[in-house]
Image: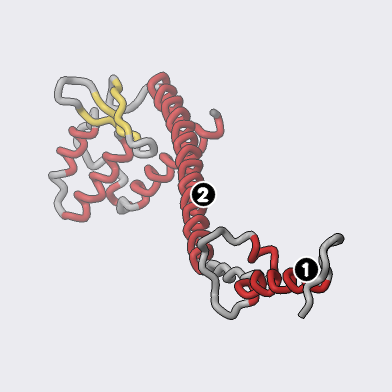
Amino acid sequence: MSDVVASRRAALAVVAAGAFLLTPPHAHAQWWKRAPVDFEECADAAEKAATKAEKTAALAECNAKFAGRRKAGGGYSYYDFLQDRTFDIAGPNPTPGEQKKIDESYTAYLANQRRSNVAEAAARQQREQQEQQQLQQVALRTEVARVPVPVERPKVQQAVAGDARSRPKGTPCVKGSFSCEWPRLSDGLNELKKIFNPAPGKPAKKG
């Protein structure tokens, strides 16, 4: 808290010092006939300066001398540019008690800014992660689409006797193929075996 207040007041002092240094040396004297009570009265007197340069210097001195501005309904307001906020004050400058409240508000303002920055950074990181995941998914789908699908090899017809015998009745076969001719050859061989090897008890046929 003390460090924040110190840095804040240092920034305000730099602004006030800058306005004072911009004022020509001859304007640092009490150029008004009667000491003004607030900024508005000081600015009215500055408007009567002889030259534009003297007028500008006088207004800068008024701004450095009075922090508050008159309100239409009475009282004064103080604009804190560090937190972009206006505070109601009783006189042309904040009292010590009013200044303390302004400093406390500035501390809370900084804390809110830090929380907001952290939340924004987290949301930005989450968005970046989601975008990265989407890009990876698109790249993966693209790679999958590029891989050729293997064509199934045609099945080789098995030319074995077992396949021919197991063929359902009425199923056509290719003429001249082994699977088609084998049944007839097998039946012919069986007939020859019966002729040359007759069953017991039956005489062999004579040629």
Q: Quadrant of the N terminus?
A: top right
SS at mark 2? helix
Examine the rendered structure and indicate whether residue 36 appears above or below residue 121: above
- In the rendering, which numbered label is found on residue 194? 1
The residue identified by callout 2 is 129
Q: Position of residue 187 (x, y in %)?
A: 69, 69
Q: Residue at x 14, y 44 (%)?
A: 47
Mark 2 crowd level (few <14, some 14–19, many ≥20, 10 Å Cα) = few
Using the image as rendered, state which of residue 149 and residue 4 is in the foreground: 149
Q: CA distance from mark 2 to mark 1?
A: 86 Å
Q: Nearer the viewer, residue 24 or 20?
A: 20
Considering depth in this image, is 137 or 162 the residue closer to the camera? Answer: 162
Residue located 54% across and 75% down the image:
174
At a point 32% along the width and 40% down the height, the residue shown is 64
Q: Quadrant of residue 62?
A: top left
In this view of the protein, can residue 195 be seen by the observer?
A: yes
Residue at 32%, 32% in the rendered image: 85
> Foreground mark, 2 or 1?
1
Task: Report helix, strand or loop for mark 1.
Answer: helix
Give x and y (percent) for residue 160. 69, 69
- Point out the residue furthest to the right here: 200
Colouring rule applied to residues? secondary structure
Q: Position of residue 169 (x, y in %)?
A: 54, 59
Residue type at mark 1 is Lys
Q: Does residue 38 sit above or below 149 in this rendering?
A: above
Q: Is residue 152 above or below residue 100?
A: below
